[in-house]
């Protein structure tokens, strides 16, 4: 498999991340927020976002998996859990891509059972027209088609995460 087509340029992605950071800066200007990065796919979004944040923020990570190759297994597994207590805290989950919604809906259930003050979601890419569990995503990056995409943190069997743009494999 090769990356054959650039879907969203590095420049467009940078502009969007800046826009999202501006919104976050406004929304959390009077409050602390824990940014919860979902590994591994969110690491590039997180890094670009972090450099544009001007709020009282800390960073935590969880690792969750549901995919093998380009197919969802339908099972979500927590590979690495939080090591802090989130009771009474504002949580902003940062996820690379919203596909079926399975990952985020399971994650939200887990997080809400731990009594945070608030939980919001940022998704860099959102696939439309797929069978999805409806979830309210407050900070949306790009809406894309149903194809399998790589780059900007997203992988195919661990590869292509480093690409600064979003591409399509074929
Ligand atoms: P969902 O649980 O079906 O919403 O899938 C979300 C997870 O699946 C993401 O965190 C990604 O790891 C992975 N995923 C979904 N679609 C793609 C894709 O097009 N490229 C790479 N990974 C994807
Ligand atoms: Mg993932």
Image (spheres, rainbow, N blue to C red):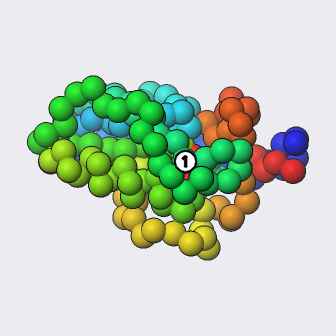
Is residue 104 in view?
A: yes
What residue appears at the point 11 percent right and 42 percent down from the top-left corner? Answer: 88
Residue 51 higher or lower than 74, as above or below: above
Camera-nearest residue between 146 and 65: 65
What residue appears at the point 47 percent right and 48 percent down from the top-left corner? Answer: 76
Picture coordinates of residue 121, whole percent (x, y): 37, 52
Q: How many marks?
A: 1
Q: Is residue 99 left or right of residue 5?
A: left
Residue lying furthest left? 88
Picture coordinates of residue 162, whole percent (x, y): 68, 29
Residue 151 higher or lower than 125, as above or below: above
Ligand 1: does it lie within 8 Å of the C-beta at label 1? yes
Camera-nearest residue between 82 and 13: 82
Picture coordinates of residue 156, whole percent (x, y): 72, 40
Q: Residue 143 falls in which quadrant of the image?
A: bottom right
Q: Residues within 10 Å of mark 1 (few under 14, many from 20)?
A: some
> Which residue lies under the disc numbered 1?
66
Is residue 152 in view?
A: no
Q: Quadrant of the N terminus?
A: top right
Residue 111 higher or lower than 50, as above or below: below
Camera-nearest residue between 155 and 167: 155
What residue appears at the point 19 percent right and 37 percent down from the top-left corner? Answer: 86
Q: Residue 54 falls in which quadrant of the image?
A: top left
């Amino acid at each position: 498999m090769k990356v054959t087509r650039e879907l969203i340029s590095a420049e467009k992605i940078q502009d969007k991340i800046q826009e999202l950071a501006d919104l976050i800066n406004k929304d959390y200007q009077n409050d602390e927020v824990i940014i919860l990065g979902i590994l591994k796919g969110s690491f590039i979004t997180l890094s670009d976002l972090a450099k544009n944040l001007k709020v009282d923020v800390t960073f935590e990570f969880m690792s969750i998996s549901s995919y093998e190759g380009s197919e969802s297994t339908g099972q979500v597994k927590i590979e690495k859990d939080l090591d802090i207590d989130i009771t009474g805290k504002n949580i902003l989950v940062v996820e690379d891509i919203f596909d079926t919604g399975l990952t985020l809906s399971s994650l939200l259930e887990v997080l809400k059972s731990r009594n945070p003050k608030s939980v919001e979601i940022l998704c860099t890419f959102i696939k439309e027209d797929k069978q999805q569990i409806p979830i309210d995503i407050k900070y949306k990056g790009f809406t894309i088609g149903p194809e399998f995409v790589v780059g900007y943190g997203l992988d195919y069997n661990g590869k292509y995460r480093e690409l600064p743009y979003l591409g399509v494999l074929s």
